[in-house]
Amino acid sequence: MKILITGICGFVGSSLARALLDADSSNLLYGLDNFIRPGSESNRADLKNLGIKLFHGDLRNPSDLETLPVVDFVIDAAANPSVLAGVDGKSSSRQLVEHNLLGTVNMLEFCKQHGAGFVLLSTSRVYSIPPLADLAVEVIDGAYRPVIDRNLPPSLTAAGVSEGFSTNSPVSLYGATKLASEALALEYGETFQLPVFINRCGVLAGAGQFGRPDQGIFAYWINSWKQQRPLKYIGFDGHGHQVRDCLHPRDLLTLLQKQFAAGSLPVDQRIINCAGGIKSSRSLGQLSAWCADRYGPREVASEATPRPFDIPWMVLNSAKAQDIWDWEPQTHTDAILTEIADHADQNPDWLNLSAPL
């Protein structure tokens, strides 16, 4: 099979490329990257040595796609993945829309031209912020949990947020670009008879991730803890009780293989959550305890003022993926954290690639 991965030199794209080749060496992989993400250059030589043909191009420029080869499937892993993008003063809102939405449109036109399938790696951030921000929570074992005896929002249970949860605005500018990309991808699929799949991912993490405070939080926290860089619990009670789930990108491999081979499916079966779920979830405080066991204790600062769009608890329920695709994550969170820490030990200057002081 011929597969094109956009954003291939990022953490998720490069992880999927390696997993696809490990699973089937007959796969022909191509990659597109603009190399503007700090650290992305570090993956270029390794991927080329694996026999992957890399193209330097920008999804925002249709002419950059004209020399790409005909493929069977496109995996769209290129995006600005920060919920603060476009509002934090470090990137413009127009650039966010151009990268995350117009880039998707250009890739969908590419798929239309060549009859290729399309897999969009989307995000939990397409879900509506107000009901999540207002969620009644309690602290159990150093982590927020929904108060189950309260009236929970529809499609939210102790097992997490399922696909029927509201996607009404506000979802952040970032979430809106991904939600709009989802809608366009499905419309292109229906209109031009293209196989299209939307995989809404939880927090993706693993060794080699370019961690920053606003993205790649597991990698950022572990590397920063080891390097004695400043760390701070931001928002809510200032004790790091906010919770996210955790998934390694390579665990998407079996799902992707089944999607590549699938025939026609109803539209509502083409959108699924892909996440580690409640078993994988950790609070920042729990992550700090793990780091203290590995590297020794240290102080973490506290600031109760919340960041824009922050929510106390985000765990995705992937029961639909299990029902439709017989998929569930395989890598335990502790194994992911150990992998990140081992990589941090071997690469003491790793944060300088993506999160310089």
Image (cartoon, helix red, strand yellow):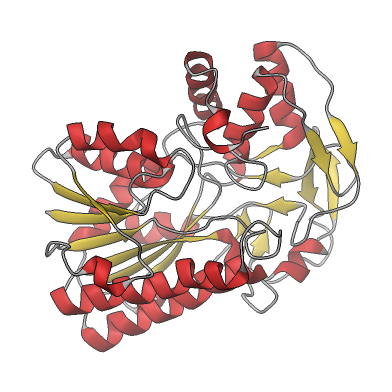
**In the visual, does 142 lie left or right of 2?**
right
- Position of the C terminus, as image quadrant, is top right
Q: Please, is residue 320 above or below residue 225 in the view?
A: below
Q: Please, is residue 265 above or below residue 210 in the view?
A: below
Residue shown at the point (18%, 48%) measured from the top left: 29
Between 266 and 250, the residue placed more toward the observer is: 250
Between 103 and 75, the residue placed more toward the observer is: 103
Asked whether residue 121 is in view, the answer is yes
Question: How many labels were placed on the picture?
Answer: 0
Q: Please, is residue 340 above or below residue 113 in the view?
A: above
Q: Please, is residue 345 above or below residue 172 in the view?
A: above
- Position of the N terminus, as image quadrant, is bottom left
Based on the displayed image, in which of its 4 quarters is residue 168 positioned?
A: bottom right
What x and y, as percent, mark residue 153?
73, 69
Asked whether residue 269 is in view, the answer is no
What x and y, as percent, mark residue 224?
67, 26
**In the visual, does 142 lie left or right of 318?**
right
Q: Residue furthest left?
A: 26
Between 83 and 190, the residue placed more toward the observer is: 83
What x and y, as percent, mark residue 111?
22, 73
What x and y, as percent, mark residue 284?
73, 36
Residue shown at the point (73%, 11%) measured from the top left: 296
Residue shown at the point (49%, 19%) measured from the top left: 347
Based on the displayed image, in which of its 4 quarters is residue 87 positioned?
A: bottom right
Residue shown at the point (25%, 37%) measured from the top left: 47
